[in-house]
Image (cartoon, helix red, strand yellow):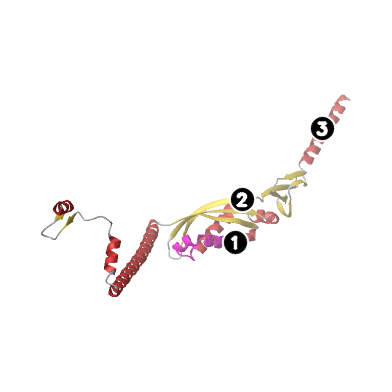
Amino acid sequence: MKTKNLSKIIALVVCAVIVIAVLATSFTVVKAGHTGVVLTFGAVEEKVLDEGLHFKAPIVQSVVQMNNRTQKIETDGTASSKDLQIISYVVAVNYHVNNTSSASLYQSVGMDYGSVIIVPAIQESIKAVTAQYTAEELITKRQSVGDQIKTALSDKINQYGLTVEIFNIVNFDFSEEFNAAVEAKQTAQQNALKAEQDLARIEVEAKQKITQAEAEAESIKLIQEALAKSPDYVDYVKWNKWNGELPTVMGDSDILLSMDELEKKAE
C-alpha cells in the first residue's frame, strides 16, 4: 500500500516538473530594441515578435533576438582617385536593422550581416566614388564625397533591410609624394599672393608720391604767382619763418663780428 502511494507521489512530482518545464519554455521575452525571429523546427517564420513577453510552442519553436538599435562599423582600406593616386581611408558607419526585415535578413544572411554585407558594400562604394574625383578634389570636396558614398552604400544595403544613418570619413591619407606636391603648390600660391600684395603696395606708394609731387608743384606755382603779383610777399614769408632770435654774428664772408663786439664799437 505504501509502495503504491509512493509511486503515485513520484508520478505526480514528475508530471508537475514536466508541466512547469513546458510552461517555462512556452514563453519568451524579446529585449528592448530587438525583434524576435521565430523558428519552427528551424524554419523562419515571416512574422517577427515585438519587444515584451510572447507565447511560443514549446520544443517546436525557438526565438532569435535581432538587434534593431543603432550599430556602428568602422573599417579601413585603400582606393584610387581619378588621377590614379592611392588613398588610404578610415570610415565609420552608423546603421540599424529595420524591424520588418529582421526575419528575411536572418534567413538570407544570419547574424553576421556586418562583415558579410556592410563592410564589402562600404569598400565597393568608396572605390566607385573616389574614382570620380582627383586626389585634390577628395580633399576640397570631402563633404560632397562623403554624401555620395553614403548614397551609394544605402543603395547597396537597403535591399537587405539595413538603413545607413550616418556616414563619416574619419581620415583620408595620400602618398608622401602627393602630400609634398600639395605643400609645394600651396607655397607657390602663397608666394604669388604675396607678390600681388607687394605689387599693389608699390602701386599705392607710387601714386602717393605722384600726388605729393603734384601738390608740391601746385604750391610752387601758387608762390610764383604771388611773387609776380606782389614783391613784398618774400618779406612776408621771411618774417613768418623767423623764430624771433637775433643772429649772434654779422658781417660778410671776410669779416664776422659777434653782437657783443658790435655793441663795444658802438660805444
Dot 2, crowdedness within 10 Å: few (<14), some or many (≥20)?
Answer: some
Dot 1, crowdedness within 10 Å: few (<14), some or many (≥20)?
Answer: some
Residue 179 sits above or below residue 20 on the image: below
Dot 1 or dot 2: first in sequence order is 2
Q: In the image, which is nearer the foreground, mark 1 or mark 2?
A: 2
Question: Residue 143: x, y in percent?
Answer: 53, 60
Amino acid type assigned to the residue bearing label 2 in the image? Gln
> Would you say 215 lies left or right of 59 here?
left
On residue 156, which mark appears?
1
The residue tagged 3 is 13
How far apart, in angstroms, are the residues tagged by discs 3 and 1?
57 Å
Question: Residue 73: x, y in percent?
Answer: 57, 51
Magenta stretch, residue numbers: 130-155
Q: Do the residues labelled 3 and 1 touch (CB within 8 Å)?
A: no
Q: Nearer the viewer, residue 139 or 234?
A: 234
Residue 258 sits above or below residue 132 on the image: above
Amino acid type assigned to the residue bearing label 1 in the image? Lys
* Quarter of the figure with residue 17: top right
* Residue furthest out toward the left: 254
The quadrant of the image that shows the N terminus is top right
Q: Are marks 3 and 2 in contact (CB under 8 Å)?
A: no
On residue 71, which mark appears?
2
Q: In the image, which is nearer the foreground, mark 3 or mark 1?
A: 1
